[in-house]
Image (tube, helix red, strand yellow):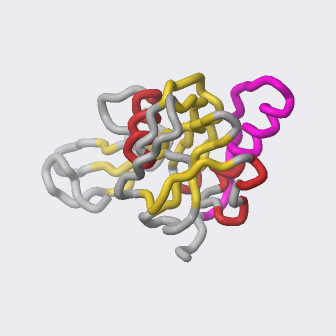
Amino acid sequence: MRFCPSCGHEVEQAIPPGDNRLRHCCPSCSAIHYQNPKMVLGTIPVWEDRVLLCRRAIEPRYGYWTLPAGFMENGESTGEGAARETLEEAGARIELGAPFSILDVPQIEQIHMFFHATMLGPELDPGPESLEARLFTEDEIPWDSLAFRTVSQTLRWFFEDRRAGGYRLHTETIRYQPRPPG
């Protein structure tokens, strides 16, 4: 951030009184601009023994496979955001289940949260952010072509839990630098 969204003056990085972190502060209007992590919400949509993946039509990681997911919008709950992203990216109708994984990714200021989801039918109609959407058995998952570590970790936990006969909530902090494009 270079300029104050409130008054347009150039901001400075400073620790405001009573705070303990650098913030973008406006010396003109005294506004403090907090920047916090973004929520990425998605689902693990299942039809019979298969999981739905989408092949990305956007950067980052164009052409790689991912679970349907995207950024939370203002005015929606985490579950509503996950269901919306599933409909937008894959055209899949789902019944949303419980949260399954929450992965903190501090280097890119994001939190990724995936929910269980049961597909209401196998019909798919990928949106403009997906090159294609497809159902995969565990043996068919394109592990080397998954877009993000949060997705591969969530899928590993999902299949481990399914083999064990019960699902639980998984959490982890993933520390890495974003991959270069391509």
Give the camera-side residue of 143 and 22: 143
Q: If the image is split into quadrants, where does the N terminus sit?
A: bottom left
Region in magenta: 154-177
Q: Residue at x 47, y 41 (%)?
A: 123
In the drawing, does residue 84 fall left or right of residue 151? left
182 in the magenta segment: no
How many marks the image carries: the answer is 0
Q: If the image is split into quadrants, where does the C terminus sit?
A: bottom right
Q: Residue furthest left?
A: 7
114 above or below 155? Answer: above
81 above or below 12? Answer: above
In the drawing, does residue 114 fall left or right of residue 142? left
Give the quadrant of residue 114. Answer: top right
Residue 4 pos. (x, y %) = 22, 53
Residue 122 pos. (x, y %) = 52, 39
Give the camera-side residue of 138 and 81: 138
Q: Is residue 37 visible?
A: no
Q: Residue at x 45, y 45 (%)?
A: 124
Q: Residue at x 84, y 33 (%)?
A: 163
In the drawing, does residue 182 fall left or right of residue 35? right
Q: Residue at x 40, y 48 (%)?
A: 125
Q: Residue furthest bottom?
A: 182
176 in the magenta segment: yes
Residue 67 pos. (x, y %) = 56, 48
Give the camera-side residue of 80 and 111: 80
Q: Is residue 92 visible?
A: yes
